Image: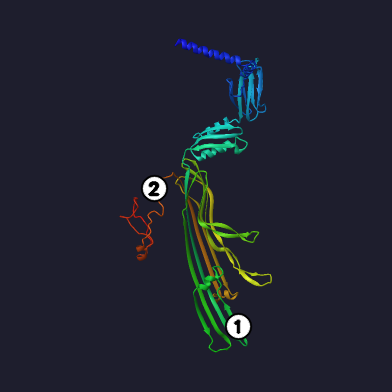
Amino acid sequence: MNIVLKKTLALIGSLFVAICLMMSPAALANEANLMQVKISSGGDGPVSKTLALSLNKAAVIELPADARDVLVSNPEIVDAVIRTPRRVYILGIQVGQANVFFFKADGTQLLNLEITVAEDVRGLSDTLARLLPQSRIQVEALRESVILSGMTPNAGQAAQAIKIARTFVDDPENVISMLSITGKDQVMLKVRIVEMQRTLTKQLGMDLAVAGRIGEVSFNLVNPAQFSLAGRFLAGSSPTIGLGYTNPIAGARGLSSIASGIRALERVGLIRTLAEPNLTAITGESANFLAGGEFPVPTGRDRNGNITIEYKKFGVALGFTPLVVSEGRISLRLSTEVSELSNQGALILASQPIIDDNGQVVGNIEGLTLPALKVRRAETTVELPSGGSMVIAGLIQQQTKQALEGVPGAKDIPILGALFRSRDFVNDETELVIVVTPYLVDPTHPQNLATPADGLRIASDFSAILLGRLNDVYRAPGADTSGQSWNGPVGYSLD
């Protein structure tokens, strides 16, 4: 075995000598020069160090040996002041990055210093720790921006931290928030809108008609009752009690006929409006709700003469932005509205004829009625605990109108003047209350939620034809619950 090993080593050595003899002296010289080239980039060498320097602040560098040469990559960002061969002052002039190289007298690299100049955030960090002790916020500077990271118990403290940080920078947009919220941040708002409207209308008037003849002159006096406040349509439909007298002698002088009618009407109206919209949103985000509709309103004409339409919303609308400011405390910026179409204040466009170039009427443009909106709106910002309620709007309004109309002079005669005048009385009363209740909520399993369609079953043909039912009617016990358990009677009953 030793003889074989010796022969193998001898063969390898012979090959190596042959290769060396084959290489030219020039090739050997170039390879030696390449082996002597050494590149040292910033931050990669064994003597590299990093330094985070605040803007307009200085740092003192103590070197282990004397420095002969100092190289600053960007003097506009960092300035190096050599106090002694072993002590150097580094000044942060402008936000940015630069590096500084230190060399010995023999050219050996003594130190490579990688410097980052940024805004000083220690004051901001101390302020946040002192004012928001329940939050764990880290502050980092990136060029001219400030980055906030960490945890806050609620969105209110996160918003306060951002507001404080914006006072430490020149541009508020340079504050970048990466804060996480540990508390509940979903808010459900329950709004109750209750409105009662009561209308009372009273009308009492005399219709008087007198006809007669004095000599060769005939006269006729007609005084119908006028009801301008509530509208003539009420007067036209009101019951009338009439009395009359007619002279049996035709053509006789004096009064030939007297007719009188008493018109009396009393109408009482009651309107009740109840809406309970519920809406859920994450803290800091806006949510909107509308239960109603939209109606078209012409806004003009385009260049081709076509009518342009814009849709206006009406109904029950709710919009709010919640903000959880502390544990169980919610700030709400909300707006709620109840609107309905009304003929009062409507815009009525009369029909117009279509006339051709010859002046002939060739058609007719139908009239158009644009309804008005009767709106009750409230906008405010309140702060409530979870589950607490507050009345944000309450309106009690009473409007009374009364008018007396009649023949001038005659209506002022005592007792008899009642025959020549009419009385119109309108009283409108409105009471509106809006109650808001916010809740901090968590998601739940869908089996714990119920919908109005749960348990609905369409009636069979036999029940629909013979019994007149639209849906099955069933009662507990023994009700078909589709495998679910319910407390009490379930299902639908249509009367």
Q: Residue at x 56, y 63 (%)?
A: 344
Of label 1 and label 2, which has the lower sequence position? 1
Left or right placement of residue 272 versus residue 466 in this view: right
> Which sits in the foreground, 210 or 285?
285
Q: Is residue 415 visible?
A: no
Coordinates of residue 428 in the picture (x, y in percent)? 51, 63
The answer to which of 111 and 451 lies nearer the viewer is: 111
Q: CA distance from mark 1 to mark 2?
A: 85 Å
The quarter of the rendered structure image containing the N terminus is top left
Residue flagged by tag 1: what amino acid is it? Phe
Q: Tell me the number on the disc at residue 8.
A: none
Q: Quadrant of residue 88?
A: top right
The residue singled out by tag 2 in the image is 447
Residue 393: x and y in percent read: 51, 53
Q: Any mark on residue 219, and which?
A: 1
For residue 465, above or below residue 27:
below
Q: Is residue 365 left or right of residue 320?
A: right
Q: In which image quadrant can residue 17 be found?
A: top right
- Asked which secondary structure carries label 2, the reply is helix
- The percent position of residue 357, horizontal first and vertical second, equals 68, 70
Answer few, some or many: residues within 10 Å of disc 1's Cα (few below 14, many 20 plus, some between 14 and 19).
few
Image position, residue 270 (x, y; %): 47, 63
Which residue is at the front of the view, 445 or 43? 43
Task: Give residue 401's quadrant in the image.
Answer: bottom right
Residue type at numbered disc 2: Gln
Q: Is residue 84 left or right of residue 394?
A: right
Q: Residue at x 55, y 71 (%)?
A: 232
Instruction: Give the position of the C terminus as an image quadrant.
Output: bottom left
Residue plotted at (59% across, 32% down):
142
The secondary element bearing badge 1 is classed as strand
Q: Nearer the viewer, mark 1 or mark 2?
A: 2
Relative vertical location of residue 338 with respect to residue 328 in this rendering, above or below:
below
